[in-house]
Every structure is written in C-alpha cells, then in structure tokens.
Image: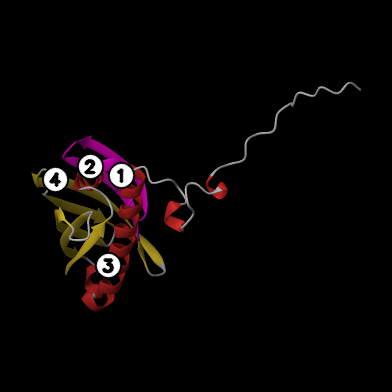
Amino acid sequence: MNVSGERTFAAPRSIVWRVLNDPSSMAKTMPGVESFEIHDDRRWTANVKIPLGLGGLKMKVDMDKVEERELEFAKLAIKGQGVGAMMNMETSFTLGDAPSGGTSMQWAADVKIAGPVGSMGQRVLQPIVNQQVQHVLSALDSQIQEAQGTPHGAEEGVSPLSPEAYEAEPEGPTSSTEDS
C-alpha cells in the first residue's frame, strides 16, 4: 500500500528538519507509543499499540535511517512485528521552501503488512492508514510549533499578549500603611 502527500509548515526548514530527525520528537507523533528506545542517531525502537477499529495491535517497531541529505531528504526503513502481523515500511520525505513562506514537505510511504491483519486487505486497511497518517502529520505540526517556541494557546487563536495566555500572579501579603 502506497501513501504520499504534501504538507506545508509555518517554520524554517532547519526547525522542521531538526524535529523530523529527533527521535524523541518523532516518538510524540506516533500513535499508540507505549515505550521508545534510542539506540543511536540512526536507529530507534518503539513498542506501540496501533489502533485498528475496535482493538489494537501491539507491535515492536524498529526504525533505521538509511539515507539522508541534511535539510533536504531522509529515508527510513521500518520493520514491525506483533502477534498477527508483520510490517515492512519504507518512508521518506523531501523538504523545500514553500512558495508562501515556511517549509514544504513531500512525503511517501510504502507499507506492507503480512499475517492475519494484512489479509484484511487494502480496502479495509487504507482508511485506517489514512487516519493514522493525518494523526502523525497533525502531531508533527504541533512538535514543529513547539520547537519554534510558539506560545501554547497561539494555535487556538489566543494572542500571546492577551490575559488568557498567562496564569494569574499568586496573591501575596500586601503592605498597608493603615494601623488597626
């Protein structure tokens, strides 16, 4: 099953690159991550529970960065194993300057699922994969905004200058010139 698309981020390419290549940031974008281990800057392992309709599929997923051109391109080879399924996925992204400013990302993934889950067929799996891709892209956008230092609340339309963006000062003792 092949999925691909394009996404624009309101951030410089260096920040988008940094988030995409930071294993701990990427772990926050993956649905169902139960644990995450970084072996080195090119290899990670995650234990995930992939949502599949009524239940979830527990899977150990090994990720290897197999190719990169800094600030421009990276490719990952991903292998997952769980009860009832084996997954092989190759995914890549290419970054460029967006015409409207910010960074454009073209991404693609070739996903192969074997075992009973894989036998459900593309017709059943495609909507689940599409939903998970949208989740990952939204979470990625949040990670990029966080890395860029966008104040929390800004994405909901609260101005960082408005009183709602800040907690109230704790009330402390006040000095008084009145005697009792």
Residue 177 drawn above or below residue 94: above
Q: Earlier in the sequence, mark 4 or mark 1?
A: 1
What's the distance in space between the residues labelled 1 and 3, CA to CA? 21 Å
Question: Residue at position x 34%, y 55% from top?
Answer: 139
Q: Earlier in the sequence, mark 3 or mark 4?
A: 4
Residue 48 drawn above or below residue 115: above
What's the distance in space between the residues labelled 4 and 2, CA to CA? 8 Å
Question: Which residue range is magenta in the image?
Answer: 23-50
Query: Which residue is under mark 4?
Result: 71
Rendered location of residue 174, percent (x, y): 74, 26
Q: Residue furthest bottom?
A: 123
Mark number, residue 18 = 2
**Label 1: few (<14), some or many (≥20) within 10 Å?**
some
Of marks 1 and 2, the one in the foreground: 2
Query: Which residue is under mark 1?
Result: 25
Is residue 47 inside the magenta stretch? Answer: yes
- Which of the two residues, 36 or 5, is positioned nearer the viewer here? 5
Q: Earlier in the sequence, mark 4 or mark 2?
A: 2
What's the distance in space between the residues labelled 3 and 4, CA to CA? 27 Å
Query: Which residue is under mark 3?
Result: 129
Of marks 1 and 3, the one in the foreground: 1
Rendered location of residue 41, percent (x, y): 18, 36
What's the distance in space between the residues labelled 3 and 2, CA to CA? 25 Å
- Element assignment for label 2: helix
Mark 1 vs 2: CB contact within 8 A: yes
Quadrant of the frame with the C terminus: top right
